[in-house]
């Protein structure tokens, strides 16, 4: 098939046409979340844009297999293998076991994804499922001389590689971005950037999950999981690997070091990285404590799909600053868009030539380094275009395979309030009941209704124009 999609490959530092290893097939891997807390909307920006990439590939006709890991062990507070295990931190915070925390936040993550219309990857694999695979890869790396034991841990020896800094256009400063909370150096390391493959000794002796290994009871490092999990499901050759830009160093650099030392050949051809979502104080991150979640946006009355559109209107390679003002602008644009689409009539037959013309325009925008903002412009253009409503509706349905903005299914109410039709009907019914109760001077019942709605996050306001409701 014809390969048309181009995007910026961090590895070659060029916008390149994606040519898969096997014609028509794409092996794609995404670094999954560390499930010790809710995902913030910054994390979800990365997953939204990766979802658009996957759906674009499918739209173009590729057979995509996408794999995602779930990090439920081994990710320490600093990406440079120091500090406390993030999962343990979460368990302590909530007085639960690590596995309870992992299950709870994995489920929450996929609930958020569903609300944002992010497709679940074909394979989702928690790291704790694959301990034997990690041990095997570490054994091979030791045998081949790429790893060494020191102070009870096993380390990868970065000095054994000719080109460890594969993403080397990154300046030293940028390379340090991934080392979030840089703590003290580990004296066991032979070289500054050596990293842990297997821990048996860490400062935090109360590590909850441990497994037997040839090097003693312990737990895997963070980076090894992605090398192993991707190979387990995609084999030794991969087409596209995705993540946020903070994954470039050290995580993805270390994944390449391990995987290529293990196989002895090039591993992944294309690296797709999404820039940060920032707030006023800089990069949104979980360690800052106060972070924005999808639930919070919903509580404030936003349909999560509005946040998806907010992300799509900006290029994935540019930092994006979040503000409620900016989100409000997108919300009103989305409501207007849905209103206009709803006005389209359902009769008539599709005008094939026009359909193809606009489909091609849409495809070209996406193929041009995933220009989602311009792809949305095509949606607006077609609404103004000289073609019948049936063609317009057919195009909306077709484009929504990638955009996933519920273009044909959203109601104006939903777009406006983030409340679905069933909930809205319930609220309106309760308002009517309250009116009747008041008329009968049954104020206790009226108050009860107000309280019941408040518990569901809905506030009633008595205004001169009647009763109004809003999300709490
Ligand atoms: P984590 O759960 O910390 O392992 O991160 C999950 C994903 O979110 C990774 O791909 C990160 O690179 C990405 N990520 C983290 N912070 C941000 C941010 N502020 N904006 C965009 N992506 C981010
Ligand atoms: Zn990874």
Image (spheres, helix red, strand yellow):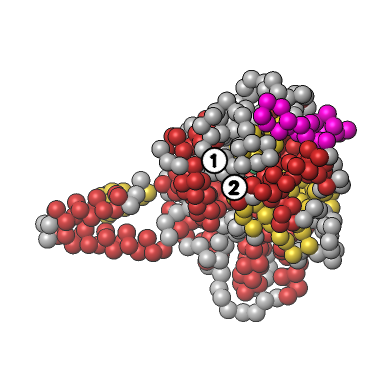
Q: Which residues are magenta?
A: 145-169
Viewer can see residue 361: no
Choose the circle earlier in sequence order: 1 or 2: 2
Q: Are marks 1 and 2 in contact (CB under 8 Å)?
A: yes
**Residue 26 occupies quadrant:** bottom right
Q: Is the residue 250 above or below the residue 234 in the image?
A: above
Asked if residue 333 lies left or right of residue 54, the reply is: left
- In the image, 217: left or right of 56? left
Q: Quadrant of residue 225?
A: top right
Residue bearing mark 1: 209
Q: Residue at x 84, y 57 (%)?
A: 21
Q: Residues within 10 Å of mark 2 (few under 14, many from 20)?
A: many
Residue at the spot 55% in from the left edge and 28% down from the top edge: 204
Q: Quadrant of the N terminus?
A: bottom right
Residue 354 in percent (x, y) is at 73, 70
* Residue 146 painted magenta: yes
Mark 1 secondary-structure assignment: loop
The residue wearing badge 2 is 128
Front-lying residue, 253 or 172? 253
x, y percent for residue 32 = 62, 47
Q: As rendered, which of 89 and 410 lies closer to the eye?
A: 89
């Amino acid at each position: 098939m014809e390969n048309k999609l181009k995007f910026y490959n961090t590895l070659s530092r060029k916008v390149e046409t994606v040519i898969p290893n096997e014609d028509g097939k794409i092996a794609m891997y995404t670094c999954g979340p560390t499930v010790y807390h809710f995902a913030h909307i910054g994390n979800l920006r990365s997953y939204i844009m990766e979802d658009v990439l996957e759906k674009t590939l499918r739209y173009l006709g590729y057979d995509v297999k996408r794999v995602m890991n779930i990090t439920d062990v081994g990710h320490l507070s600093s990406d440079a293998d120091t500090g406390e295990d993030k999962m343990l931190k979460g368990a302590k915070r909530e007085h639960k076991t690590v596995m309870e925390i992992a299950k709870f936040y994995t489920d929450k993550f996929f609930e958020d994804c569903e609300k944002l219309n992010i497709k679940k990857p074909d394979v989702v694999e928690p790291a704790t499922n694959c301990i034997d695979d990690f041990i095997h890869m570490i054994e091979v790396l030791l045998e081949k001389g790429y790893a060494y034991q020191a102070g009870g841990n096993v380390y990868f020896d970065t000095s054994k590689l000719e080109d460890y800094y594969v993403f080397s256009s990154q300046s030293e400063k940028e390379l340090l971005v991934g080392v979030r909370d840089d703590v003290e150096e580990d004296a066991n390391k032979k070289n500054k950037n050596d990293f842990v493959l297997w821990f048996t000794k860490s400062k935090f002796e109360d590590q909850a999950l441990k497994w037997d290994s040839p090097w003693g009871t312990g737990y895997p490092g963070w980076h090894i999981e992605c090398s192993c999990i991707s190979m387990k499901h995609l084999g030794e050759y991969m087409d596209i690997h995705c993540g946020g830009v903070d994954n470039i160093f050290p995580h993805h650099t270390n994944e390449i070091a391990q995987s290529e030392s293990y196989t002895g050949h090039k591993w992944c051809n294309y690296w797709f990285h999404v820039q940060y979502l920032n707030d006023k104080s800089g990069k949104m991150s979980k360690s800052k404590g106060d972070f924005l979640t999808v639930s919070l946006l919903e509580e404030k009355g936003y349909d999560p799909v509005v946040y998806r559109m907010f992300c799509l209107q900006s290029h994935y390679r540019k930092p994006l600053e979040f503000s409620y003002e900016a989100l409000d602008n997108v919300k009103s644009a989305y409501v207007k868009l849905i209103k206009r689409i709803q006005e389209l009539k359902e009769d008539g037959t599709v005008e094939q030539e026009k359909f193809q013309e606009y489909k091609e325009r849409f495809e070209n925008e996406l193929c041009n380094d995933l220009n989602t903002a311009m792809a949305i412009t095509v949606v607006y253009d077609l609404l103004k275009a000289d073609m019948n409503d049936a063609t317009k509706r057919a195009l909306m349905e077709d484009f929504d395979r990638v955009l996933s903005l519920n273009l044909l299914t959203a109601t104006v109410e939903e777009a406006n309030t983030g409340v679905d039709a069933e909930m809205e009907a319930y609220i309106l019914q309760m308002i009517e009941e309250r009116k009747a109760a008041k008329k009968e001077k049954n104020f206790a019942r009226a108050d009860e209704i107000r309280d019941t709605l408040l518990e569901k996050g809905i506030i009633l306001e008595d205004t001169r124009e009647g009763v109004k409701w809003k999300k709490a």
